[in-house]
Image: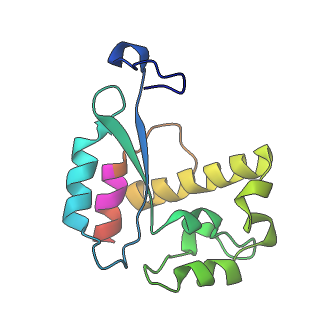
Amino acid sequence: MDKNGNTVTSASVSGIYLFFDYDNHATNADDNKLFKMLELFNNETEKGKLFISYPMVEALQHIKSDISFKNIVAKCEKAYKREVKANCDDEFLHFNDYSIDTWNYLIKQHIRKANFIVNNRYEYQNEIIEQLQIFENQKEK
């Protein structure tokens, strides 16, 4: 149902996007289940497309101007949220304060990092890197 109480049909939906904040340190975290979810939810026009934040949404903020983002490695521990708050530039502390320029900068940095994780090249690329590729390479590395 939509906000007006009307039935939503598959014909009226062009894509389904699922966003998941993965806390690897949680007691019920399971990489095998996550792998199966990535395999199942891999198409936005069918069952949905899953996007995951590793190790959690704070990874988006984990940028420091005097350290190459390529060299920042996230530790999947309970203290990660505090670590990010203590080790990121002030401009990245509050999501609600982000400008379009800030979002564009962060997106480009994360695209470079995804390319490095998957292809060993820390550079911007226009090709889509699938979540499953990122997940598999992160586990391997």
Residue in the image at 75% along x and 71% along y: 65
Residue in the image at 39% along x and 19% along y: 7
Where residue 98 appears, as percent x and y from the top left, is: 77, 54
Where residue 134 appears, as percent x and y from the top left, is: 37, 56
State yes or no: residue 103 in magenta: no
Q: Is residue 21 left or right of residue 97?
A: left
Q: Nearer the viewer, residue 69 or 93?
A: 93
Q: Is residue 82 left or right of residue 17?
A: right
Residue occupying the far top of the picture: 11
Residue in the image at 70% along x and 75% along y: 88
> Which stretch is magenta?
132-136
Where residue 54 appears, as percent x and y from the top left, is: 45, 64
Q: Nearer the viewer, residue 100 or 120?
A: 100
Q: Quadrant of the N terminus?
A: top left
Q: Quadrant of the C terminus?
A: bottom left
Place residue 43 in its image quadrant: top left
- Above or below residue 113? Residue 85 is below
Specify whether residue 87 is in view. Answer: no
State yes or no: residue 135 in magenta: yes
Where residue 104 appears, as percent x and y from the top left, is: 70, 46
Place residue 118 in its image quadrant: bottom left
